[in-house]
Amino acid sequence: MYLGKVIGSIWATRKYEAVNGYKMLFVQPLNADQENIGEPIIALDTVGSGPGEIVFYVTASEAVIPLDVDMAPVDASIVGIVDSINHQNI
């Protein structure tokens, strides 16, 4: 799982039938200090997150697991909304 921040949304009038009903959101990957790392990605929202929220997401073949379908062309899915982050540099 990876940490990210929702920075926007995508509206598509037509999309693959298996992903109808899911929002497509832009997610900026973050490190544990909530600093941007890498380029934003597009992820399907499975938990009702929105702009400005810190989320965690899965990628690759695991991204389809949270969906209500057996197979879909999905590279990333948001699977949780973060309430707080506590970490120590050791």
Image (cartoon, rainbow, N blue to C red):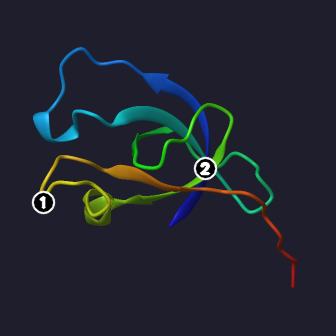
- Horizontal side, residue 83 vs residue 57: left or right: right
- Horizontal side, residue 61 vs residue 53: left or right: left
In the figure, 54 relative to 20: above or below?
below
Residue lying at the far bottom of the rendered structure = 90
Image quadrant where residue 67 sits: bottom left
Q: Position of residue 69 (x, y in %)?
A: 16, 54
Quick one: SS at disc 2?
strand
- Point 18% across, 46% down: residue: 73
User: In the rendered image, which residue does mark 1 sit on?
Assistant: 70
Q: How many marks?
A: 2
Q: Position of residue 22 (x, y in %)?
A: 32, 37
- Point 36% across, 18% down: residue: 11
Quick one: SS at disc 1?
loop
Callout 1: few (<14), some (14-19), or many (20+) C-alpha neighbours within 10 Å?
few
In the figure, 85 relative to 69: above or below?
below
Q: Which mark's residue is nearer the viewer, 2 or 1?
A: 1
Q: Nearer the viewer, residue 47 or 89?
A: 47
User: In the rendered image, which residue does mark 2 sit on?
Assistant: 4
Which residue type does callout 1 highlight?
A: Asp
- Point 78% across, 60% down: residue: 84
Q: Position of residue 25 (x, y in %)?
A: 46, 33
